Amino acid sequence: MTDDITTSRRDFVKGVASGVVGGTLAGMGFYSYTGSAYSRLPKVARGQMDFGVVRSVKSTVISETSWFNNAHLMEDIMKAGGLLVDQYTIGWAPFANGKGAGKSTYEEGIANIKKMLPGDLETAWATQNKLALHPDNPGGFSTLLEVEDMDGSKHKYLLDTGWSYAWMDQSFKREGIDQMLKSGEIEALIQTHEHFDHFWGFPVAMKYNNKLPLYIHKGFYKEGRQYIVDAGYKGDPIVVDKEMTLIRPGMMLMKFDVPIICRVFGETSLAFNVKDKGLVMISGCNHQGILQMTSTATQKLKYDNDRFYGLYGGLHISPFEDWDPKYDDLVISLGKWNFEKVGCNHCTGQLTAKKFIERGYPVVRGTARFRTASQDYLGNGDTITFG
Amino acid sequence: MEAQNESITYLESRKLVKRWRGPWPAIVNLLMIFALFAVSWWVFQDPRGIMRMYTPYDGYMICRWLLILLIWVAYIFDFWPFKRSWLNKVHPVIKGVVLTAFSVLAMMVLIKGFFMGLLGQYGIAYFSPDRLHAMGLTEFYAEEYSAEAIMMFAAIASWLAPAWVVACENAPWQKLEQPARGFTVAVVTFFLATIVYFLTMHSHMAILFYPWQQYTAITPPYWEGFANTVSGNFHIAWIMSCTVTVWVYESIWERYPFNLIKTNWLRRTSAFFGIIAVALCMCFFIYYAQDLMWGETVRGTKRDAAPDWRWLHVGETAIFWLVGVLGLNFYGGNWPTKFSRPVNAFLRTVLSLVIGGVIYVLYYKYAHFLIGTQKGFAHPQQFPMIPMIWLINIFLINMWFMDGWPGWKAVPKTEAELSEVESVVVAHDVSWTPSLAKGLALGTAAGVAIYFGVINILPWISQNVQIIN
């Protein structure tokens, strides 16, 4: 009798143990990916932060050509060890040490040129050209933003400072940025992120104004922060550590904490509320993704007509003219967001721009001047105005 | 090298005995494994290290194919062409070095010779980096695309190759001698992997190129509507879940419950498809759990909000569990062992999930300080499967090739112990009784309740627990 009870209890426990695993698996399999399960997801209330309004935003492309030969850039990255390698070690100017791909350090590179910054950039770049991989390849990304307030007053901001000292200085002069910096006309510099092609030309801006307000993402590594000092900046950088930072009424700096290739962390992008038009988003590289940016804006911000009006910048989809099926997810989905005006260049990828145009998206085409490769891009010297 | 006709495989024929009492064997082995991981990671994979194969796809391809080769050598070929006598007498360290070198050599022949050479040069261009480069792709992406395709093949093989041994018990070729059995099972599973590859990954590769290669692959792929993406990562999700489930079934579940089926063909078929069913349950749950934690996906966006990444992360999450499963099985003595098989399996499942969860948290909290990766969950060029599979490969080399040296040593099993091997294949320790039925009913209800409890608590965890600062 006792044996029977024991056996019965043992069988019961065996059944319970098996049933718990089976029942849990049944729930996981039959319920998880169903409409009923998704109807349970909490509805996220929209924040609707009122951040003011501007009459218009004009963007002038100072330089969108970050590098001139994609094969050479990828060759350097490959030799250095791939897309996860620290950018300061790859062996590019201005941090090359002449030891070859993947063997540079910030300290050794900057030691060669520090005393020349920011006054003698020609000598500094020439010095680095003797040490660097493919020294003629760097260009850079930089954009001038002109924001018109409702009272008609205009305010200028510099978005990023490019890469090559020589190319950026030439581009600054072409668009009159050097004079705007000198005169204090440009009210602030926003460094969207730490990547070589957006940030390493920083001393060029310092050459003309080393005290202008500077915004950087809090994810800048110690090398990047030291470069700001070594390049001769005399101000106190504003480290962006909040998701939303109001620059001026109608102009919001949005922070995204995203890991990025070549050991960079985080990017900031700009949102503008253009009167009677809607939201305009402008980015340096948009590593967070266009739709991540639009989703965040939808959730947090209030804007006219509750619609997306414009998009401009490097949209970082196929920057190395590479591809992945997930990029097609974006190409297919972008239409649903109904942007009225899209300007793209730089890391968007020429293939992406081509696919956008094929789908009938309202891409503003450029003039392909000053070494910009395609009219599908808003090119160097081109402008786009929202409002 | 001699033909082998042993009915019991080498792994089944040996018993691993602790060299020291208490937890010391596990501690010593784990310390050695972490040291080997650190050194080998630095030499081969680390983006700051020597060879820097974590480009990422080169390193991804290598670690996945090495896993397949380890499975082939130990499970499919039963160590052929190495003699059983050699396996029994040679020092574990020498054995580990020789067998690992043999596996690496075979892997290189397969990757360079078969995929890049034969298939890439005479069949499908995207397997050959040289051909892609010659057609205008940068050398870097030519290598990455090729490595991605070859790696995807390995992902499928890492499910099918062990599944044929574990679930199908090598049938109908189980009585063949080596190497006939090994070659037969390898060829058959490779053939099945090829079919699955064409059904799951070929379209993914075809839309890497402009325009979509619609004359050679189905584009857009058939799964687009269901998975909300055109990316083949959807398939990585369930295929990796299958891989993990095979080893869960083989190790901590001791082939329970399908080993209760006495009819051979029914048991084998049930086990093969049962593994897929369990994997699909896991796959859909992990995807849904992410939506509960991080919010619903937005198609076309990037990183942790993108459907393609969420599917990929299903596979990544499953692999963390596999590390817990194998760690418990190899170094925890498959603890506990004193209860009935269903209770042991249940307790091990819970324990391995906890271990896997801890490894997951530790990885995302600290890996960027240690292995050259970057902070954050969703980096487009970063795959936690690479370090996890690298670690699993070292586990397997230690336990399969080195007999658990230094903490364990191999001794031959007794006749009684050998008969236990058979009882794992066909079990008699659970039979249908009214008490079992009652327990099963209650347990099933409890399991469903646990499931709903978990999905209710996940949003709260998301709001209150931060893994990455």
Image (tube, coloured by chain):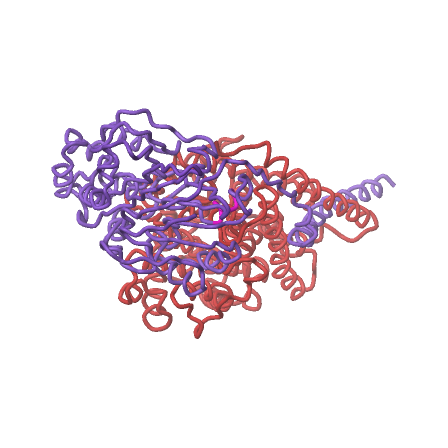
Chain colours: A purple, B red
User: In the picture provided, is A52 more to the left or to the right than A376?
Assistant: right
Residue A196 covered by magenta stretch: no
Residue A154 is situated, as x and y percent measured from the top left of the image, at 36, 38
Q: Is residue A252 above or below residue B117?
A: above
Q: Residue furthest bottom?
A: B215
Q: Residue furthest front?
A: A151
Quarter of the image holding residue A105? top left
Residue A224 is situated, as x and y percent measured from the top left of the image, at 30, 33
Depth order, front residue of B306/B168: B306
User: In the picture provided, is B236 more to the left or to the right than A358?
Assistant: right
Depth order, front residue of B51/A193: A193
Q: How many tags in the picture?
A: 0
| Residue B402 in sight in this render | no
Residue B250 is situated, as x and y percent measured from the top left of the image, at 58, 51
Residue B217 is situated, as x and y percent measured from the top left of the image, at 46, 71
Rendered residue at 42%/51% (across/down): B87
In the image, the segment drawn in magenta is: A291-296
Q: Is residue A78 above or below residue A353?
A: above
Q: Is residue B253 above or below residue A152?
A: below
Quarter of the image holding residue B265? bottom right
* Majority SS type along the magenta span: helix
Q: Quadrant of the N terminus of chain A?
A: top right
Depth order, front residue of B179/B121: B121
Rendered residue at 19%/32% (across/down): A118
Rendered residue at 36%/32% (across/down): A215
Q: Residue furthest right?
A: A1
| Residue B459 in sight in this render | yes
